[in-house]
Image (cartoon, rainbow, N blue to C red):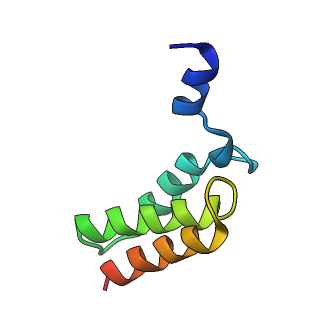
Amino acid sequence: MTHSGQDNIKHPSHYTSFPIEVIRMIETILNSIDGLTPFQYYCLGNEIKYRMRAGLKDDVMQDIGKAMQYMEFRK
C-alpha cells in the first residue's frame, strides 16, 4: 500500500479537518457519558462521525441523513 493510501486509512482528510481528529473527539465524548447500552454507544459514535464529516466526503444531506438514522437507532 502506498503512503497516501495509508493516510486514507489511518488519517483520512474528512476526519482531520478539525483541531483534533474525529476519532479522538468520539473517544472523549463516549468516555464522558454513562448509562448507555453498548449498542447506544456504537450508534452515538456513528452519529457523531457522520455529523462531523458532513459534506467533507459524501453529500452533506446524505451524511446528515445517516447521522439521524443512527440517532433513531439509539432510541
Where residue 34 appears, x then y in whole percent?
A: 35, 71
The answer to whether residue 52 is left or right of residue 70 is: right
Task: Look at the picture and state if 10 lies above or below 40.
Answer: above
Q: Residue at the location (57% across, 74% down)?
A: 64
Residue reaching furthest to the top: 2
Q: Residue at the location (31% across, 78% down)?
A: 73
Task: Look at the picture and state if 18 lies above or below 11.
Answer: below
Where residue 45 appears, x then y in whole percent?
A: 43, 61
Where residue 67 appears, x then y in whole percent?
A: 49, 72
In this orientation, which residue lies closer to the viewer: 57 or 16? Answer: 57
Q: Residue at the location (76% across, 48% down)?
A: 19
Q: Residue at the location (51% across, 31% down)?
A: 9
In this orientation, which residue lies closer to the viewer: 55 or 74? Answer: 55
The answer to whether residue 56 is left or right of residue 73 is: right
Residue 21 occupies quadrant? top right
In this orientation, which residue lies closer to the viewer: 69 or 33? Answer: 69
Where residue 50 appears, x then y in whole percent?
A: 54, 63
The answer to whether residue 68 is left or right of residue 63 is: left
The answer to whether residue 36 is left or right of residue 65 is: left
